[in-house]
Amino acid sequence: MYKKVFVSLNMLLLSICYVALSISFPSKWFRDRENYEIIAKYSNYFFYNLGDLSFTKEPVFLFINYLLTKITLFTNVPYFYVFFITSMMMFFLYKRSDSLLLFLLGLIALFIIPFTFHMQFVVLRQGIATVLFIYAIVCLKSNKTVLMLMLPLIHASFFFVLVLYYSYVFLKKYVSNILVISAIISIFSVVLFGVILGVAEYIGFYQLSYQDVLTIDSSGKAFVFNILILVFL
């Protein structure tokens, strides 16, 4: 019993230190932070001028910005997001770790793996939506629908993610082999991504105007790697 308490206290202490360290990093170290500050500063204008197809403009994220600017400076808003994302990640890690060693390995992985690092410190909108998505899957046994449907209104990419997730849930009812499910989802995701990209360009998803889209590596290595990870999982 004492050993369990000791391990729990150490994981809690490490979690607090990790979150404190994360929010101590200056925003100038990370790209896109200035954009988050601008969105927060003018959130009132953005929220009340969504225009047509407002669901593509991530209104929930804009509303969260609007609320936060009522209690803090707009320059502090990205730090709040980092605090929320890293705290949630520590919660998941604590919940799933059976030992202090596993917790430490998970902590190191969060910081050194590019995807998790960017999720916590760079692509904050995706990070917020991702931790809420994980929370719904890991912690909610029922009544997930409302939270799930809110995610695309925080980051539009979750329109795509939710289709894949519910396709997986549907397939599990009829297909027992996980490799077959993974293969079907992989092929479906390629087709769906092409369709969604075309629709997004047609209706004007503003994310497509980002310069990153124009300079992204198109060799396909990352896509192949992620498909292999998906099959493995």
Image: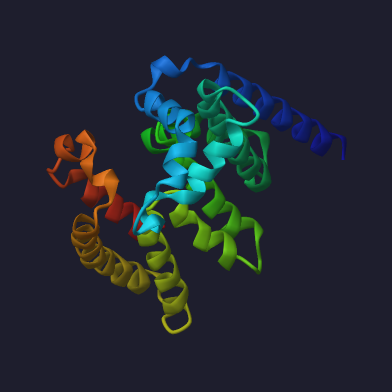
Q: Nearer the viewer, residue 160 or 220?
A: 160
Residue 146 is left or right of residue 122, and the answer is: right
Residue at (61% x, 40% y) in the render:
88
Q: Nearer the viewer, residue 66 or 149?
A: 66
44 above or below 33? below
Q: Position of residue 78 (x, y in %)?
A: 50, 28
Q: Position of residue 181 (x, y in %)?
A: 36, 72
Residue at (18% x, 61% y) in the render:
198
Residue 173 is left or right of residue 159, and the answer is: right
Q: Position of residue 17 (x, y in %)?
A: 65, 21
User: From this viewpoint, is residue 91 visible?
Assistant: yes
Residue at (40% x, 75% y) in the render:
177
What is the quadrant of the N terminus in the image?
A: top right
Residue 152 is left or right of residue 17, and the answer is: left
138 above or below 169? above
What is the quadrant of the C terminus in the image?
A: bottom left
Residue at (58% x, 64% y) in the render:
146
